[in-house]
């Protein structure tokens, strides 16, 4: 159970960033304030740490399940440390001054605690190598899809609600929501939860083509389908079915 809670805590920043509207500060005719090099380094490191923590915890749970409490706590603790540094270094930009990523740091602290408490979980059963490799592939495909979304981005002429949801899903992909979903499926390994997480990866893959066809929007895109997510979903569903005899993390 605590392994699952650790991954959930690690993925909560992406969930919150997907739900809340982004900050818009406008443009000004005078010289805009810029953050210091130290602030850029600190906040960038903290941001990357938060983005990659769900994947790191999921991979640790797959490949080194018995060492998950120690390694997971170390990884989460590193992100917690990076988040703590943001309270010491102000970040100044056009939107004002930010000092401290409170929610992010709190989630890292919760993930660290959950990893340490994972010692109380029943010893994890051995996951077949093929299933481990399959979920690892799902994680890699989801991460690749998120990191390359700018390269694959296509802009069909969607309007009204079709465009609103396209923007929301694009923002969710940009902040790593689907990576967190893949990580959740990999820690569950099998069962309905893992299958649902894998199927959910079809949302960023198929929304754009379906919305374009159903709304009759024009486009000049060579391909509308997010194929990395399609592959991740298919592999995840097969892995979840193949691992039906393996106890998921939330039952162990």
Image: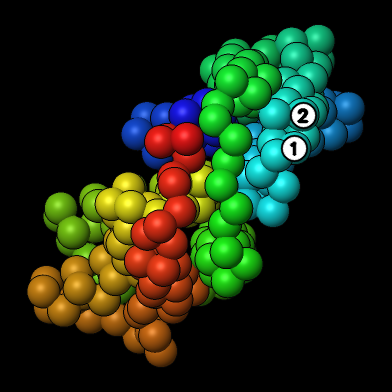
Q: Position of residue 94 (x, y in %)?
A: 62, 27
| Image point (58%, 41%), residue name | 124
Q: Place residue 57 in its image quadrant.
A: top right
Q: Position of residue 132 (x, y in %)?
A: 59, 62
Q: Place residue 214 in its image quadrant.
A: bottom left
Q: Position of residue 128 (x, y in %)?
A: 57, 64
| Image point (44%, 72%), residue name | 235
Label 1 SS? helix
Task: In this rendered view, identify the residue nearer to me: 189 or 37.
Answer: 189
Kindly identify which residue carries mark 2.
70
How many numbered callouts?
2
Task: Please indicate whether residue 111 sits to the left or right of residue 89 in the image.
Answer: left
Q: Place residue 115 in its image quadrant.
A: top right
Q: 10 Å neighbourhood of mark 2: few (<14), some, or many (≥20)?
A: some
> Would you say residue 173 is visible in this rendering?
no
| Image point (77%, 29%), residue name | 70
Q: Residue furthest right?
A: 38
Task: Please indicate whether residue 47 sits to the left or right of residue 127 in the image.
Answer: right
Do tag 2 and tag 1 residues touch (Cβ < 8 Å)? yes
Label 2 SS? helix
Q: 10 Å neighbourhood of mark 1: few (<14), some, or many (≥20)?
A: some
Instruction: Residue 67: give its label.
Output: 1
Residue 157 position (above or below residue 101)? below
Per the model, the C-alpha gap separating discs 2 and 1 is 6 Å
Residue 172 position (above or below residue 42)? below
Task: In this rendered view, identify the residue nearer to me: 176 or 121.
Answer: 121
Instruction: Residue 210: give its label.
Output: none
| Image point (35%, 79%), residue name | 224
Q: Position of residue 25 (x, y in %)?
A: 50, 29
Task: In this rendered view, identify the residue nearer to me: 123 or 179.
Answer: 123
> Would you say residue 5 is visible in this rendering?
yes
């Amino acid at each position: 159970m605590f392994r699952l809670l650790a991954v959930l805590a690690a993925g909560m920043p992406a969930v919150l960033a997907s739900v809340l509207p982004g900050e818009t500060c406008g443009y000004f005719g005078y010289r805009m304030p810029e953050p210091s090099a130290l602030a850029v380094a600190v906040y960038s490191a903290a941001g990357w740490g938060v983005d990659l923590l769900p994947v790191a915890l999921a991979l640790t749970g797959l490949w080194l399940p018995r060492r998950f409490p120690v390694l997971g706590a170390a990884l989460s603790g590193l992100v917690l440390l990076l988040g703590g540094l943001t309270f010491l270094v102000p970040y100044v930009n056009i939107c004002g001054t930010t000092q401290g990523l409170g929610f992010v740091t709190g989630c890292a602290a919760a993930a660290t605690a959950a990893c340490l408490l994972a010692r109380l979980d029943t010893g994890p059963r051995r996951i077949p190598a093929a299933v481990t490799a399959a979920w690892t592939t799902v994680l890699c495909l989801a991460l690749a899809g998120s990191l390359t979304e700018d390269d694959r981005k296509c802009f069909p002429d969607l309007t009204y609600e079709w465009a609103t949801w396209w923007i929301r899903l694009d923002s969710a992909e940009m902040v790593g929501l689907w990576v967190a979903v893949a990580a959740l499926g990999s820690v569950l390994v099998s069962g309905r939860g893992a299958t649902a997480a894998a199927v959910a990866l079809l949302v960023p893959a198929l929304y754009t083509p379906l919305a374009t066809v159903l709304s009759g929007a024009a486009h000049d895109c060579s391909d509308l389908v997010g194929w990395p997510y399609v592959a991740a979903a298919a592999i995840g569903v097969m892995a979840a079915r193949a691992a039906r005899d393996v106890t998921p993390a939330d039952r162990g």
